[in-house]
Amino acid sequence: MLEVTRKDLVSVLKTTADLLDLLGVGDDPFRAQAFRSAARSLEAVDTEPEALVARQFVGIPKVGKAIAADLLAYAETGVFGPLEDAASLIPAGVLSLFRVRGLGPKKIRALWDAGIDSLEGLREACRDGRVAALKGFGAKSAASFLAAVEFALASQERQHLSTAAEVVGALCARLNGLDPRPSGDVRRGLDTVRVARVTVTGTPDDLTERLGGLVEDLSAVEGKPVLAGRVDGVPVEVAYAEAATRGALDLLMGGSGPYREQLRAQASARGLDLTGRGLLRGGQPLSTPTEAEVAAALGLTLRPAEYREPEHDDLWTTLPHPDELVTVASLRGMLHTHSTWSDGAASLADMARETVRLGHGYLGTGDHSRAAHYANGLSIERLLAQLKEVRELQAAGLPLVAGAEVDILDDGSLDYPDDVLEQLDYVVASVHSLFTLDAARQTERLIHAVSHPLVTILGHPTGRLLLRRPGYALDLDAVLAACEQNGTVVEINANAYRLDLDWRAALRWRDRLKFAINTDAHVPAGLADAKYGVMAARKAGLTPAQVVNTLEQSEFLAFVAAQRAGRSR
Ligand SMILES: [Zn+2]
Ligand SMILES: [Zn+2]
């Protein structure tokens, strides 16, 4: 059993009440109140937590049987079921708004309804006047929320890849002319990033001039050719070198820690010293403008940036050359997307047009099914009506493929009957409920779902939300083995809050599975998230042949037909 404090108990109850208030669960308005009353009661009661657990919370006012059972499970496992269930219904970005001082469920709901669903989005909206214009906010509170959201962003230890990549992009734009290059975790496509790093050819004076007004608290890092600071709360480092020694800088700034150590060891074995100021012999830099020249001087083959994590150590020489890996341009189908039919913000036609504008081939619809009532999931009647619209838009020349993101129900069955699923061009099956099942039951549930003859793709397989919650308890390898056995495609959800399947698992399973890189976009701009999924897929060494949405529309439909036919045998 874990050591729970009274503060923990009160906090999970209050947080659950907040989330229920935020969700505005229509069928039972008193549920949030029940958790809040229980929290107050526990705050007031004069008994130690161990004693409360020992007596199973019996006799504590306002703590009913159901809440008592959930609290006992929490004391046992650290997981409070009602909290996890509520959190699973709320996008991670919206949850992160609770970290902004002064924001409670009501205000967060108003922001969410206005399409503001992340810390970064809130900061933007405070700046451009949207928050001030919202009912119940005003200019004064927008200013105080701006300060609070900047603090919340600054206090994050790691950032989502999308956040850091945007900062790196802004730095590179400012450093135009100094040959700026993304470096560090962003360059390697890691799912979360500690510091946004860029390298340039130039001097500290060149940098200071250009970075003014963008980087706060800019200062030199002692002993290193690096200036550090923050952009919008994100820690940044800009490293500089002369052109002749740039290779050493790029390699050191672009390595993982362990990879850097390997390189340094190799250098010293050869009587050299690998530093940010160059590859030195007797204190003098050798001319090594590129990473490849440094590697050659060390007697090594240059390791591609994608393959520089410890997980690649024994593998990378057997993995495809970076030129052969999947790219955003190689993605033809944008599968698993949402529209105004469920909880998306744009019409099917607008989503399809944006898909084409971005250079992709076709849009696969993937709105929520009826169990996802919180997300305006489609009844069978509405699904069939949507299907009719898809066929009409197809006839009008829009490249659409009809699908659905179907909830996996408690027992692993699907949320629509087979005769309905059969009418769809493809089916994504996802878990959106019962996050707290034990590993054995969750595994069984998912294996049941991926073995269904009409499931094309398993959506966000682990349910993790980066920097917010781990995935559900699960024997992932057993589920992936069932996907292999049934020819079920596994999603790499490209949303930077998910990046689920994790690239490490995709790397382990790369030769045995087919993958789909799906944005799960709820707005047209979300389709551009494909790049983050591609970064993860490249770390897993995936080529276009292993990713089904690199197929053209007709090929993809043929793939699904063959998948279904193969199972009915
Ligand atoms: Zn989903
Ligand atoms: Zn989705």
Image (cartoon, rainbow, N blue to C red):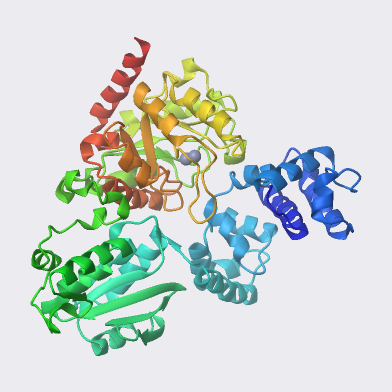
Q: How many marks?
A: 0
Q: Is residue 285 visible?
A: yes
**Is residue 366 visible from the viewing direction of this image?**
no
Could you tell me which residue is drawn at 52 percent across and 18 percent down?
417
Q: Where residue 372 appears, x then y in whole percent?
A: 58, 35
Q: Nearer the viewer, residue 332 or 391?
A: 332
In the rendered image, the residue lying farthest to the top is 569
Q: Image quadrant of residue 324? A: top left
Depicted 43 relative to depicted 461: above or below: below
Q: Which residue occupies the foreground of this view, 370 or 484?
A: 484
Q: Position of residue 296 (x, y in %)?
A: 8, 64
Residue at the spot x=32%, y=21% of the render? Answer: 563
Left or right of 55 in this view: 341: left
Occupied quadrant, residue 561 = top left
Q: Residue furthest bottom?
A: 205
Horizontal and vertical percent position of residue 321: 15, 48
The one of 84 and 256 positioned closer to us in this rendering: 256
On-image quarter of the C terminus: top left
- Res 437 → quadrant: top right
Front in this rendered view, residue 523 or 277: 277
Q: Position of residue 557 (x, y in %)?
A: 29, 25
Whether residue 4 is situated above or below residue 103 in the rendered picture = above
As drawn, is 482 to the left or to the right of 322?
right
